[in-house]
Image (spheres, helix red, strand yellow):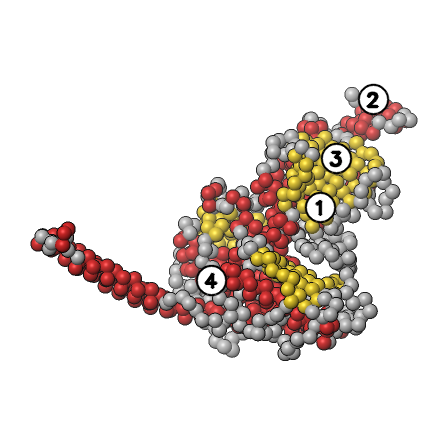
Amino acid sequence: MDIVDLKKNLALALSENDVDFKKILSLANEISKHDTESVRFSVDASHISRLGHELVSKQETAVAELIKNAYDADAEYVKAVFKQTSKAGGELKITDNGLGMSRDELINGFMRISTRSKSENPRSPKYTRQRAGRKGIGRFSAQRLGMRLQLTTRRLEDTYGICIDIDWNKFEEVGDLILVSNNITTDSAAEIGTTLRISNLKDSWSNAQIQRAYRFISDLLQPTPLQFAPKKGEGDPGFTVEFFEEIDGHETLIASERQNILDNAHALISGYVDHDGVPYFSIHSKRYKIEDGPEQLISDARVKTVFEAEIKDYSHLAGVSFQAFYFIEDDLPPGSRNIVRNVLRKNSGVRIYRNGFRVLPYGEPQDDWLGLQRSSALRQLLPPHANSNFIGFVQITDLAGEHFEETASREGLIENQSFSQLQDYIYKSLMNGIIKIAHARGKKIFATDPSAKKTTVERVDEITSKISTYVEKINSSASNNGLPRPAVEQAKLDEDVTEIFENIELLEHDTKILLEELGMLRVLASLGLTIGEFTHETRHVLSALSAGIFRLSKSHPEAEKIKTLQTNIESLQAYMRYFDKAVTQNSQRNLEVHELRDLIGDFQQVVESAIKRQFVSLTVEISGYELFVKPSHKSEWASIFFNLFTNSLKAINRAKTIGDIRIVAGEVDETKLFVEFSDNGDGIAEENKSKVFDAFFTTSTPADALADDEVHITGSGLGLKIIRDIIENGGGDIYISEPPKGYSTCIRIEFPRAEEEEIPDELR
């Protein structure tokens, strides 16, 4: 058809009362092809299917992306129901109570490929959440999962909802994308929020896959176990997600904050104060079969709070109640360890609710209103009991403000006698709980408790004595019927006995050498404990300084010196946390499977303040999920990343340039994973590339006590040697690789991937 006929047909289509939009678009599209002066890009409809599989390779990732979209829409609750999904062809329904979408937002957002909405608006409109969803990936996630999508959405201010029905099979047909139409209708019965109904699923879903999808969104979860608080106050109320499986009309809860997070707590410690001011306490632990209370709180005399006042009267606390879930991070089950740690990292602490409203800053990361951090650092009470070991809430009912009143700045409660009683009651209740758990675990509780364990020397002496006694009995015993042994047999026995005693002497000699080495290791271990205690104690001082500076910044918001001081303290706090964590991790010598995404994420969080202070940018690019490295020590990975990071800082400092560090990770093949650490520093001279992994080789100069910052960023020449030893002992390889464009140095690590049998069933 020539252009003249096309124009006539288009004019005729436009003049009709019942407009055929598809026909108009088709004719206009054909007319545009007759343009002899310019050409335009067009998109084949089948490209949608390819994008779905290329951008979202795994079905678990696709579900996670859809959940993240609900988070970005300021939803408080998401329910995902997997219906008849034991084999392909089932249905997935995801419902959230977020803000919903208007017709314009649906058309220009969800239905428009590659929008700039999230880059231009990086935070959500209601709760100002940092957006978690990847740009434009939601629609492709839905296409990746099933062949049909029904989307229903409604905003609070709208009188009805809107629905769109998308049949992805239409996109398989050859033709222009713009010509594929999808029906849109209204629904007056639609609930506020958004519902996605994805049918004719392309894959089956096992219980393990559903659990894995839940783990992928663990960094968004904010547990709210105290459901009896009538209101959660201003600000973000939290984000709760539940996964259900529906079989023959019956729904079963598969994954939730209760099952995957709170049920992994070692204990639930709770309590209340009655109307006469009598404090009560309870502890429940399925793991250790403890069901105690409520019983009147009688504190162990050895349990001392870090506050000066000794409280015995709780008359101001009538009606106060609390709950706290107690976690021991190093004793979590493998299948839930990462998800629980992610949640504890962001949401641990004991919060205060007064008359149903949250009172800040109690329970925030830098707040230590119960003195748990300081108490943990003093180590008079040995079981773990820092803020990071608890997810808890305290509820105060004091409508008249008789005992508890907020400060004039509305930042916390006035620290009066009532507040001191509250601190004492909650602290002692928590300590009673962890003491009971420590008893059940067979752990030492107080530093003054005697140790019943025998020393290594005592154990060796005991074994040697038993062997000697046994040999003597054999040597002195007679043969059958009490008759002497024949000479040949006796000679052979004497020879065997002599050999046994010689071996005992060799064992004793080797043991002494090992004990000497063990003594040296004890010295190093004690140094590590000293560092740990120092960092704990210093962190509390820094917390107090940080709080003071925060108040100053409120009254002098434009003061640059205060901002600089605040930045420096944040950097110190990050390093304190790093050393504290490293010492703890090195005490746990169990080999475990770790996911690269978690390892790099932990490291990135540690150095966040440092890169800001050094004016260095750090970008991280990780391709894929389930990048499990073979069983190894997490603390060694921390050492690897930190050494590479400090080397990059040195190189950048020497180059006197605006620093740029890039970490890229992914899979080499089915057996190996890789991490590349690049920087734009001064690079490595060609003649030094074969030496950098040798012991004591360094391009840095030693720093004295009065050296400036530039000189202090130096090394001993052992860092890369230690890294190489760690990686090679694990069966991996490390070498200098060709740096990407814009970078001068690239260190590449290749490390064995965990075998299927090495990955716990819960992680598969």
Q: Nearer the viewer, mark 1 or mark 3?
A: 1
- Disc 3 target residue: 150
- Disc 2 target residue: 5
Residue occupying image coordinates x 77% and y 61%: 356
Could one spot residue 492 in this view of the protein? no
Cα distance between the residues tagged 3 and 4: 52 Å
Spot occupied by residue 221 in the image (x, y as percentages of width and height): 66, 52
In what element is the residue under mark 1? strand
Q: Residues within 10 Å of mark 3 (few under 14, many from 20)?
A: some
Spot occupied by residue 692 in the image (x, y as percentages of width and height): 42, 59
Q: Look at the picture and state if 332 lies above or below 206.
A: below
Residue occupying image coordinates x 65% and y 73%: 544
The amino acid marked with disc number 1 is Val
Residue 78: image tag: 1
Q: Residues within 10 Å of mark 2 (few under 14, many from 20)?
A: few
Nearer the N terminus, badge 4 or badge 1? 1
Residue 587: image tag: 4
